[in-house]
Amino acid sequence: MFRTVRKAVSEAYDPDPRAMVIVAMGSSFLLFSLLSYSAGSSPYYLFALVVAVLSLVCSLAMLAVEALR
């Protein structure tokens, strides 16, 4: 059952590894830029920081899954 669901999801959603590399590079640059800026009290700054971390983690997770295939 689990194998069938996993196969159906992988057929429906097949990410391009090159796109995930581009997202990882862009989000890591954004994260570096945000961490070098020291005004952490702004809610916009915190939102951008959370988005950069989440996009970096998700792109690295997808690249790891692609490497396991």
Image (cartoon, helix red, strand yellow):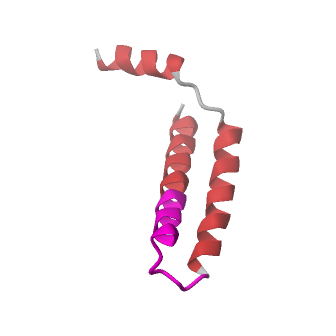
The image shows residue 13, relative to residue 49, as above or below, that is above
Magenta residues? 37-53
- Type of secondary structure dominating the magenta stretch: helix
Q: Residue at x 50, y 48 (%)?
A: 58
The image shows residue 65, relative to residue 21, as above or below, that is above
In-image side of 3 versus 23 (left or right): left
The image shows residue 43, relative to residue 62, as above or below, that is below
Q: Residue at x 59, y 73 (%)?
A: 34
Expressed as whole percent of the image width and height from the top left, the position of residue 5 reads 36, 17
- Residue 48 part of the magenta-drawn span: yes
Expressed as whole percent of the image width and height from the top left, the position of residue 37 reads 60, 82
The image shows residue 13, relative to residue 54, as above or below, that is above
In-image side of 42 versus 21 (left or right): left
How many numbered marks are there?
0
Expressed as whole percent of the image width and height from the top left, the position of residue 59 reads 56, 47
Furthest residue to the bottom?
Answer: 38
Picture quadrant of residue 8: top left
- Residue 43 part of the magenta-drawn span: yes
Q: Residue at x 65, y 73 (%)?
A: 33
Furthest residue to the left?
Answer: 1
Quarter occupied by the C terminus: top right
> 16 or 67, which is in the foreground?
16
In-image side of 37 versus 50 (left or right): right
Quarter occupied by the N terminus: top left
Expressed as whole percent of the image width and height from the top left, the position of residue 26 reads 68, 57
